[in-house]
Image (cartoon, rainbow, N blue to C red):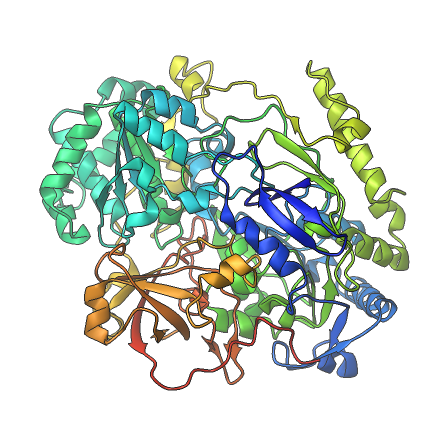
Amino acid sequence: MTTHLTHWGAFEAETDGTALTAVRPWRGDAEPNPIIDNVASAQHHAARVDRPHIRRGWLENGPGAPGRGEDTFVPVSWETALDALAGELRRVYDTHGGKAVYGGSYGWGSAGRFHHAQSQVHRFLNALGGYVRSVNSYSFTVSQVLLPHILGNLNNLLVRHTVWGVITDNTELIVAFGGLSSKNSRTNPGGHARHEMRVPLARARERGCRVVSVSPLRDDTPDEAGAQWVAPRPGSDAAIMLALAYVLDAEKLADVDFLERYTVGYERFIAYVRGEVDGVAKTPQWAAELAEVPAEWIGDLARDMASHRTLLAVSWSLQRAEHGEQPLWLGVVLAAMLGQIGLPGGGFGHGYGSAGSAGKPRTLTSAPSLSQGVNGVEEFIPVARISDMLLNPGGQFAYDGGRYTYPDIKLVYWCGGNPFHHHQDLSRLHRAFQRPDTVVVHDPFWTSTARHADIVIPSTMTIERDDFGSGLSDPVFMPMPALTRPHGEARDDYDTFSALAERLGIAKAFTEGRDTRQWLRHLYGEWRDRLAGMGHPMPSFDDFWGSEYVEIPVPEPDQVLLSEFRDDPEAAALPTPSGRIEIFSSTIDSFGYDDCPGHPVWMEPAEWLAGPRAERFGLHLIANQPKHRLHSQLDIGAHSQAAKIAGREPLRIHPDDAAKRGLVDGGVARVFNDRGAALVGVRVSTDVRPGVVQLSTGAWYDPDPSDAGFCRHGNVNVLTPDAPSSTLSQGCTGQHALVEIEPVDSDVPEVTVTRAPAV
């Protein structure tokens, strides 16, 4: 029995050298994740890429040949694929330079730190001269752009959360906007050995801590929390928060001393809340009409928050929407008004229930990883603007106070990700992917992105290669020796890039003369020396490689977010212009963005606007993260497939809304709007608010051959808008959309994306 690490958990496996014969949760995990059951069943699935392939049109007619995403593929030898790819890279770099190569390659390709796909492709492209990069994340771009302006250091929120143990012992009330999703907390970038959320919540509840979950979905908070469920109209969180601020101010419950010492700009904000700026007081009655919740509940909650040690938690999901800056900023402001920031169990939290790292103490250092080198190209895009870039070369875009130009991309290189999962308005992305001369994809599987490539390189899965891994804030650092031989002719990405580097004359820069095992030994040795210098000796590489895991030291097991700042705001000043929490940001205000002013405000989402579109599409869609897989990874695995209905992604709908439309549990339906349509399986449930439907992301995109906007498998992103949260962040708005749904009584088309394409 050998241990192995994934983004969603550690497991113990038995193997016959070709396949895993048994998989069970790692015994060190108190809250194991059943997603591990996807691994063994996916390894030799019909959707594996077994050898290199080249799209027929590209092979016969060269770069720029039409038909991408619709053409057949030709299996070729490794020599043929590598020669063709090296030749095309040489042509593009010699003719256009690195600014014509998009290598953002966003995705969660591997839990291992050496074979981290994005690091591999970035190191390779940097050795060639660089590439156009992407910045930020589909998960929390708004947070990455906004929070440095108001708190100064995003690292504080990513690795210095108040830990679960402190919450368990001190918090009296958790108000969770967007809930505390246990399914999301089961995953963590880089790996997640010990899951920790449901048990601490149960212990906190036993001590008397109460949880209020503000979400249109009941199960956004686990049963262990015993939460009070309040289900407002989706997108109304900012209105509720403004009304809470109104009550705290009007009833003199705000901590004025804290606000004066630790913040700037409160007076400008509260004048807006009182209605002195626009003539509209942000009262509970005002918010109740917008949010469709009782005004009395808002007032009672404000008083409850002020009279208890309160943790105000804001999920990442709230900022994945139009004007997503506003509820996030308001979460910080409300915590400041309560005066509990920096106190054990109080204050503000961002990411609890969004990723497994939230609530864990930071480690002394991260696990070793491969250097990506230096990028010689300055051009970049915000990560969610890929379609805009491909469709509008030379176009202008604003971002975080600057103005930039979209580059003219000739070659897209993707390794370890699936934009046809995480991007929005997939019909538009399909059109955008027609424009480059060449698209190259490394992947173990025939995902929709691989099917939109010209050259497809088969990659190994983590169980088929040597590596080591540890996730963000996870002290468990595991060796990950290969458990089986590679499937078919699949190769490690490092070996593929090494062979290309030889052909292109950059082998020394890329490999530094090392193979995989030599790199693992070298990187571990550097990491071990660094820790020894900090007074923490670690075992030799050979001892580590033969062990189950080692523990990375944790310097502050009982850490509390911003406690140093609270203790001494001068000595531990925040890296903001004022050194304090910026309730009003003069920097953001100076940008002059109409859609993100200098302090948080109420801005009505465009999806709410009355008119023919709102009348036609009468249901509010929530596109959240799936329960049975991580994003789109291993959607063909047994655990993910078991959740399907008639082979389609399940959509949840309230019984009243289902009855009005003639929908029955277990049936197939068409969900649609003016962007696209998808076939889904119907799941009738009282766990969703009336007027709301929920369809998770990650079903592999399976477009109809005659209509790229129609997904036969149920990919929600044919329905979501490809529009930015604001000019400030350019973050994705994939959480919400308006839709309608109707039963499908006739024969439904076959799902084809779960097998290899025509070759």
* Above or below for 163 versus 564: below
Count of labels in the image: 0
Q: x, y percentage for residue 359?
A: 45, 31
* Above or below for 144 versus 423: above
Q: Residue at x 69, y 58 (%)?
A: 99
Q: Along the horizontal axis of the image, is 520 left or right of 640? A: right
Assign the C terminus to one quadrant of the image. bottom right
Q: x, y percentage for residue 402?
A: 51, 48
Q: Along the horizontal axis of the image, is 52 left or right of 749? A: right
Q: Quadrant of residue 459?
A: bottom right
Q: x, y percentage for residue 322?
A: 35, 55
* Above or below for 213 versus 155: below
Q: x, y percentage for residue 713?
A: 47, 72
Q: Is residue 578 visible?
A: no
* Above or below for 30 versus 568: below
Q: Quadrant of residue 185?
A: top left
Q: Along the horizontal axis of the image, is 574 left or right of 487? A: left
Name the foreground residue: 446 vs 638.
Answer: 638
Q: Residue at x 56, y 57 (%)?
A: 633
Name the foreground residue: 447 vs 402.
Answer: 447
Assign the N terminus to one quadrant of the image. top right
Name the foreground residue: 333 vs 378.
Answer: 333
Q: Along the horizontal axis of the image, is 302 left or right of 702? A: left
Q: Is residue 587 visible?
A: yes
Q: Quadrant of residue 717?
A: bottom left
